[in-house]
Amino acid sequence: MDTQLLSTNPTITIGESLTFQVAAEDVIQVQGVTKVYGSGSNTVYAAEDVTFQVRKGEFVGLVGPSGSGKTTMLAILAALLQPTEGQVSIDGYDIVAMKESQRVRFRRERIGFTFQANNLVPYLTVRENVELMLRLNGRLNRQGRERVVELLDRLGLSERLNSLPNQLSGGQKQRVAIARSLIHEPSLVLADEPTASLDTERAYQVTQLYADLIHEQDKAGIMVTHDLRMCRYVDKLIQMKDGKIEAVYEGNQAIERAINGYH
Ligand SMILES: Nc1ncnc2c1ncn2[C@@H]1O[C@H](COP(=O)(O)OP(=O)(O)OP(=O)(O)O)[C@@H](O)[C@H]1O
Ligand SMILES: [Mg+2]
């Protein structure tokens, strides 16, 4: 892959009071995070005292039953949702303490996400959808345009650069969404059920590609999935239940056991 994809982001200055002391390799530090919805008899603990870390180059699978808090955690990490309690640092920045305007910029520069409904802009071509992330960051120059074409080529989409989203298959759209989540070189890549609309074979391919890109580019990545089989590509597996972390599996054998249900 083009080494320019590995070049560093322009740094953002947010103020020293927002920086954390974190281990050098940790991109994400989540400490005692709780998210409460409602009040009285309607109180829901969507997340409860959640603590974990994700290192550079680590691809994490986040699994658990429906309603266990996976999307809630992803939204908190994407700086889209404020926790009720607890600390979240990304690249050493305290994203909970940031002002909303700082958070908007932080999100745009340092975070890439794909959601199940991949939200491609319907009237923009494949190439333009991916370029959009660079445009928003003021980085759409000749070099940026070349990187878009290279990344789309890597994702097997070089024949589809000028297609509109509604001319693509589900798997192709998903790969465009993955390109868009990586092109601005974020530190943290988040994906909520990225393979939900794909057949098994295609889902394996997309997940493997995703894992490869995260490893090659030394990002931290979290993928929420209902499908444990997709976790064969992860470095760490976090299982949630009722808003809490139920188990964490690390290392090939542990993850194999979890996938095969021997836990
Ligand atoms: N805006 C909200 N208001 C009230 N309760 C909410 C809200 N958003 C989520 N919840 C509740 O929080 C809990 C966790 O929801 P979340 O969406 O994080 O689950 P999930 O693990 O992503 O589930 P799924 O696998 O079905 O997507 C659920 O009980 C849900 O009903
Ligand atoms: Mg969800």
Image: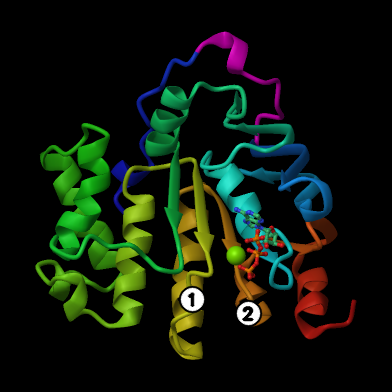
Decide if residue 174 is in sight here: yes
> Which mark identifies residue 227?
2
Residues at discs 1 and 2 in contact (Cβ within 8 Å): yes
- Name the residue carrying label 1: 195
Q: Which residue is drawn at 36% across and 71% down?
A: 174
- Where on the image, by quarter, is ligand 2? bottom right
Q: Residue at x 66, y 60 (%)?
A: 70
The answer to which of marks 1 and 2 sits earlier in the sequence is: 1
Decide if residue 60 is in sight here: no
Q: Magenta part of the protein: which range?
A: 15-25
Q: Residue furthest top?
A: 16
The amino acid type of the residue labelled 1 equals Thr
Q: Which residue is drawn at 45% across and 62% down?
A: 115
Residue 17 drawn in magenta: yes
Q: Which image quadrant for residue 31? A: top right
Q: Position of residue 65 (x, y in %)?
A: 73, 73
